[in-house]
Every structure is written in structure tokens, then in C-alpha cells.
């Protein structure tokens, strides 16, 4: 668990330990890890389908510090750490980021972001149990259905979005 120790030592955003109940905290974090794994698998699946590779960064001029500040800001949002949010947002803005680019970054992190409007609608149909129509939708399996739901849940939790059971709302963010 060097990751937790490192994040703590470097004062990076992380989930608060739950009153020293490490076993309970690990169970909670394991749930997040499963959703997080599904999120990255769905993003990779979409990226590979679109021919962008797993993760493409269209803005190659973005500085490493700004990327790190953005990542840490959204982690602070995920774990509801207001002090860390303020700190990392300031670093992001001080290094050339804007409020608009921070929000655009959130939207770009949606697991289905790279899909077209028709492909997103097809994923919605697929999740509702209907037959997909697009090439991407036809590639999806039953295992992908659960993975996509978990990825959407992770995205919703990470970016502290309004809780909703409406798949359409989550897909069309």
C-alpha cells in the first residue's frame, strides 16, 4: 500500500481513513477500485474502437504540473476535500489553466466521451436491453453492460455529480 503512504506524505488528495478501521476502509476502497478499473477499461475500449489508442491527449502543450493539478483537483472533489480543491485549483489556474478548461477536462473524462451522439444513444439502447444498431453497439457483450454501468457510476462519484438512476442523463453528460 505504498500508494496511500505516498499520497499522504506528499499531501495529495485521498479518502480519509475511517476512524482507524483500516479493514473497513479497505472494503470501501476496494469497491471504488472495481468501479475505477471498469472506468478505465471502458475508456480504453472506446479509445481503441475510435483508433485513438487507450488514452490520447490532444493538448500536448499542457504542462505536467497543470495535468497533475487537474488530476489532484478532481481527486479532491471525489473525496470532498474542500481545502485540497482550493489548493489544486489555484495551482491549475496559476499554470495556464482556466475555469473553462477545467470543466472541459471533466467532460472529456466521461468514459464514453469519444463516441458520436448516435453511438452514445446506441449504448443507452444496449443498457436498456434493446438491440444495438451501430458498429460499436454490436461489439458490446453482456460483460460490457455491467462494466459500462460501473464506469458511469465511477464517473458520477469521481466528479461529484448529482445522483440519478437515469442512464440517459449519465451517458449524455
Image (cartoon, rainbow, N blue to C red):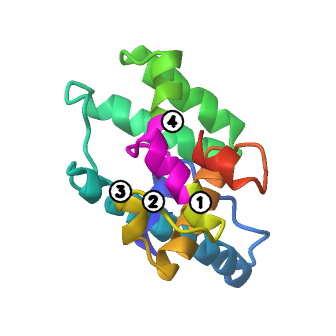
Q: Residues within 10 Å of mark 2 (few under 14, many from 20)?
A: some
**Closer to the N terminus: mark 3 or mark 2?**
3
Q: Which residue is mark 4?
A: 107
Q: Residues within 10 Å of mark 4 (few under 14, many from 20)?
A: some
Q: Position of residue 78 (x, y in %)?
A: 64, 49
Label 1 close to label 2 by CB (< 8 Å): yes
Q: Which residue is mark 2?
A: 133
Could you give the CA–CA distance between mark 4 and mark 1, rounded to whole angstroms? Answer: 22 Å
**Element type at mark 3:** helix
The dot on residue 125 is 1
**Closer to the N terminus: mark 2 or mark 4?**
4
Q: Residues within 10 Å of mark 3 (few under 14, many from 20)?
A: many
Q: Viewer-nearest of labels 2 and 4?
A: 2
**Closer to the N terminus: mark 4 or mark 1?**
4
**Closer to the N terminus: mark 3 or mark 4?**
3
**Which span is picked out in magenta?**
106-123
Q: Which residue is mark 3?
A: 46
Label 4 close to label 1 by CB (< 8 Å): no
Residue closer to the observer: 119 or 108: 119
**Element type at mark 4:** helix
Amino acid at each position: 500500500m505504498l500508494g496511500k503512504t505516498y499520497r499522504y506524505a506528499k499531501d495529495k488528495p485521498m479518502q480519509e481513513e475511517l476512524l482507524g478501521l483500516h479493514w473497513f476502509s479497505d472494503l470501501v476502497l476496494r469497491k471504488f477500485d472495481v468501479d475505477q478499473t471498469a472506468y478505465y477499461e471502458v475508456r480504453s475500449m472506446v479509445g481503441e474502437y475510435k483508433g485513438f489508442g487507450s488514452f490520447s491527449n490532444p493538448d500536448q502543450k499542457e504542462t505536467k504540473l497543470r495535468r497533475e493539478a487537474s488530476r489532484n483537483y478532481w481527486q479532491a472533489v471525489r473525496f470532498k476535500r474542500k481545502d485540497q480543491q482550493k489548493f489544486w485549483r489555484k495551482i491549475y489556474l496559476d499554470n495556464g489553466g482556466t475555469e473553462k478548461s477545467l470543466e472541459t477536462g471533466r467532460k472529456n473524462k466521461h468514459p464514453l466521451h469519444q463516441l458520436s451522439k448516435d453511438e452514445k444513444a446506441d449504448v443507452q439502447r444496449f443498457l436498456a436491453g434493446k438491440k444495438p444498431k451501430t458498429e460499436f453497439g454490436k461489439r458490446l457483450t453482456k460483460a460490457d453492460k455491467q462494466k459500462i454501468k460501473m464506469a458511469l457510476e465511477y464517473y458520477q462519484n469521481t466528479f461529484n455529480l448529482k445522483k440519478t438512476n437515469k442512464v440517459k442523463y449519465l451517458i449524455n453528460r
